[in-house]
Amino acid sequence: MATLSVSGSATHRHRAERGVVHLTVGFDGDDREKVVRDTAAVHSRLSEQATAWRRQEAATWWSARSVTVAVETGVTTDGVDETRASSGVRFRTRAAVDVRFSDFDALASWVGDVALEPGVTVEWIEWSLSHARRPEVEKAVRVAAVADAVTRAGDYAEALGLGQPTVQSVFEPGLRPGAPGGGNPFGLARAVTTFSSGGPVTFDLHPDDIEVSAEVSADFVA
């Protein structure tokens, strides 16, 4: 009788089902009230648009999660007498808006519009699966990883002239006794799109597939 210790892994690819647009709104200037008011006005418009997309069911969720107002001090020159400097105070605001779309045509349309909005930066788009789909996808890839381990054990047993191996134990990453650390038994990679734009824009977005992977180790006897 021999003990066979093997690993098993699997990676499945799925089309993206959600796209989260991450935006920031911000202005800089020496008039604190104007900087804050301009930021609040744009931020309010974006929030209203996000709410409208949600009501139309083109978006499934949105968040306006943070606002910062910072004071920046420094030394400036008047451009005429370089030896005469005066202290300057400027104000800087930033606010974030995130919107998760299920309708990618609506997403592309909105990105094209907000990319032209003064004070708005489209930071990145994060592509993912829907929350409802994830358990099914994760289960399938775990089953495939175990099947891979079974196949490997069978191959080794056949090469050694042994009978059909019988599983004794299966371990997720980091759970095998004596193995270092702990890990996630599967990984779900979210594709990300980053870009900058200027002028009239129409985006033709084709997100990468979402990769879902799983890994196990197992002991068999044959």
Image (spheres, helix red, strand yellow):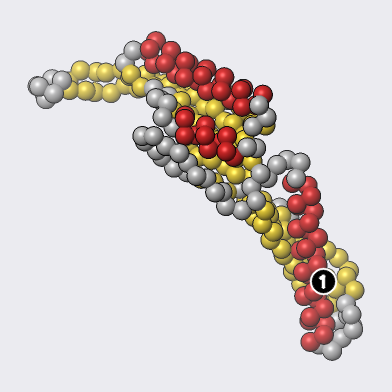
Specify the quadrant that holds the N terminus: bottom right
Q: Position of residue 38 (x, y in %)?
A: 42, 16
Q: Is residue 45 above or below residue 219?
A: above
The outermost residue toward the bottom is 161
Q: Describe residue 85's horizontal placement relative to residue 129 as left or right.
A: left
Q: Position of residue 107 (x, y in %)?
A: 56, 36
Q: Is residue 208 above or below residue 216?
A: above
Q: Is residue 222 above or below residue 80?
A: below
Dot 1: element = helix
Q: Position of residue 46 (x, y in %)?
A: 52, 23
Identify the amino acid type marked 1.
Answer: Val
Tell me which corner region of the image, top left, top right, bottom left or bottom right, holds residue 174: bottom right
The outermost residue toward the top is 33
Question: Residue at coordinates 74% horizontally, 46% vertically from top-left?
Answer: 134
Question: Residue at coordinates 69% horizontally, 59% vertically from top-left?
Answer: 12
Foreground residue, 23 or 74?
23
The outermost residue toward the left is 81
Tell me which corner region of the image, top left, top right, bottom left or bottom right, holds residue 217: bottom right
Say if residue 121 shows up in the picture: no
Question: Residue at coordinates 84% horizontally, 89% vertically from top-left?
Answer: 161
Q: Position of residue 51 (x, y in %)?
A: 62, 22
Residue under pointer 1: 150
* Mark 1 surroundings within 10 Å by alpha-carbon count, few (fewer than 14), some (14 through 19), many (20 or more): many
